[in-house]
Amino acid sequence: MNRIIRTAQRGLSIIELMIALAISSLLILGVTQIYVDNKSNFFFQQGQSDNTENARYTLLILEEELRRVGYRIRPDEDPTSAFRAENEGNCNFAAGETINYDGTNNRLCLRYQPHIPGLTACDGIAQAGPPNPYELPAGSSNLIVDLTFTGNSLLCNDQPVFDNLVDLQIEFGVSNDNSRQADAYTQSPAAGQGIQSVRYAALIKSRYDNIATDTESQAFEYWHETYYDTEGVTAPDRALYLVTESTINLRNLTR
């Protein structure tokens, strides 16, 4: 008689299956958390980098334009003759005036004469410039630059050059005796006060609004305490904020 031997087959028990699922879940959670942390760290670093680069770019634009204010191709020409009373767009200048600020509309107007052919202002438009040193080009006109802060953007002659600018504060260093040292800083220089320098402060935010862990930002709070005398102000979002400040001497106007 042939004997039939039956071999029992065994699978995973419920307990073993649950242990395996638990271990797998822990591994998946760990990997997911690492991914989330790395992603958050990447956006944080990217936000910090953006703010730093934006701060440098803001300084570059303002410094480059302000350094040119009042430049004359012929230095022996009287400023009131080189810069006559002029109105263009939203900028209005009295005779001899090369810079003014409209605090109501956050508009900084300045003018100068292009010192080299092909010179571009912050709007990227090339200018004719003098054909030879100290020689005025035929039909030349002063270059007028309109820097306006509106809607979290900085515009140069109506062309957007910088975004994510939350707020901008500008003050003029003035002197009553035309010395190189500013006696005081004001947003509205009086008639007869010589402008020696411009001091600006900008509040910049990152391009992403959900980087920080909460809405408490030291930079945002400092800004409102300093310029609006308001304490304990929290940010409207979880973006990263940065305050940049600088003072630029107007070398063509100092005496």
Image (cartoon, helix red, strand yellow):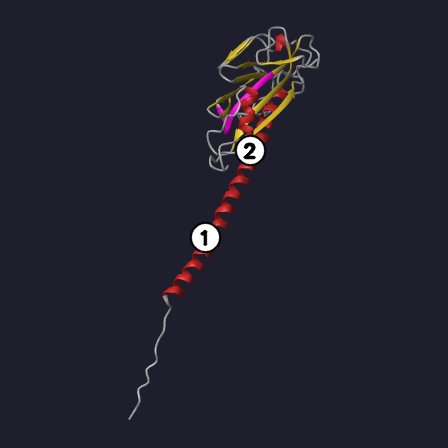
Farthest top residue in view? 191
Percent position of residue 39, x then y: 50, 45
Query: Dot 2: within a 10 Å radius of its alpha carbon, few (fewer than 14), some, or many (20 or more) residues?
Result: many
Comparing 192 with 95, the one in front is 192
Question: The N terminus appears in which quarter of the rendering?
Answer: bottom left
Comparing 198 with 238, the one in front is 238
Which residue is depicted at the point 36% across and 71% down? 11
Farthest left residue in view? 1
Q: CA distance from mark 1 to mark 2?
A: 33 Å
The stretch drawn in magenta includes residue 163: yes
Task: Tell me whether circle 1 and circle 2 mark residues in contact (CB < 8 Å).
Answer: no
Which residue is depicted at the point 55% across and 14% down? 101
Residue 116 in view (yes/no): no
Residue 110 drawn above or below residue 61: above
What is the magenta range? 159-171
Under mark 1, the amino acid is Leu
Query: Dot 1: within a 10 Å radius of its alpha carbon, few (fewer than 14), some, or many (20 or more) residues?
Result: few
Residue 169 in view (yes/no): yes
- Mark 2 falls on what kind of element? helix
Percent position of residue 169, x then y: 55, 20
The stretch drawn in magenta includes residue 203: no
Q: Is residue 7 left or right of residue 190?
A: left
Comparing 53 with 250, the one in front is 53
The circle drawn on residue 51 is 2
* Residue 194 image-quadrant placement: top right
Q: Which residue is mark 1?
A: 29
Farthest bottom residue in view? 1
